[in-house]
Image: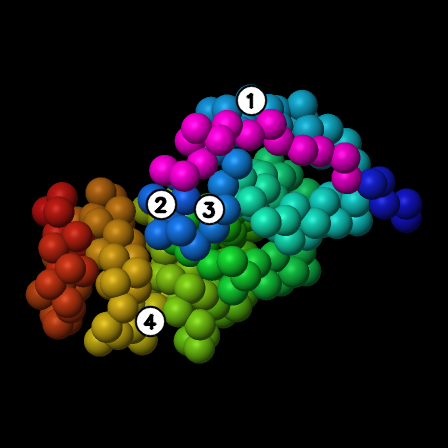
Amino acid sequence: MEIKQLNFTFVGNPDNAVAMAAYMKNKFEFLGLKSGDRKEQSKLFVKKSRQVNIATLQAWIEELYQRTEREYHYLAIDLAEKNVKRWTFADIVTFKQFITQKSWWDSVDHWTSVFGQYIKLHPEQKEKIFTLFFKSSNMWERRVAITLQLKEKDQVDTGMLTAAILFDQFTDEFFIQKAIGWALRQYSKFNPGWVLQFLNEHQLSNLADREGSKYL
């Protein structure tokens, strides 16, 4: 299967680059493109991605993710998200590698959104996807396990959610505790009684408890 060469570059805005890098703790270089500008510049390219073969698309995602500037990482995830209906479980396994590459909350949560959309399309694979990240030694992968079901509304598997939270119940890591609170807060919109009982029965960090009970 022929792989088409990737031929795409952004036109940056240096006036924004320094502030954007500072917002991300100077962990990454930025071209200075805010979300709207990035999506406008890449709109035709993303549209084109829906017509290329899977091997080409995967190669493009890989290449974009290896570039230096953060906007290209976002574009790689945009491609995965806009083509979510084309993926198989094997593709999701391939994408798992990016959770531990160039990791920070912005990319990890965007990838989690991709995985969340995938399990809505393939609910029978939810447990398999969850297992890819549950009990990982990498805290970003465990954050995925905790927040995987954010889009599931009243279809949340409470057994999975409970297991993911309790595994990290006493983990002293801001991004983990924030994720616990976020997952509980989101589910409380659909099942407040369950979340209230969970909070009453389990000792959580002040951060997780505060975030989780926000809508109760």
Cα separation, mark 1 vs mark 4, equals 40 Å
* Dots 1, 3 in contact, CB < 8 A: no
User: Circle 3 — which element?
Assistant: helix
Cα separation, mark 2 vs mark 1, equals 24 Å
State the image coordinates of residue 177 (x, y, percent, origin top left): 24, 63
In screen coordinates, is 195 left or right of 2?
Answer: left
State the image coordinates of residue 85 (x, y, percent, origin top left): 63, 41
Cα separation, mark 2 vs mark 4, equals 35 Å
Sequence-wise first label, 1 or 3 = 1
- The residue that mark 4 highlights is 163
Q: Which disc, if any, is residue 110?
A: 3
Which quadrant holds residue 135? bottom left
Q: Nearer the viewer, mark 3 or mark 2?
A: 2
State the image coordinates of residue 22 (x, y, percent, origin top left): 35, 45
The one of 32 and 110 positioned closer to us in this rendering = 32
Sequence-wise first label, 3 or 2 = 2
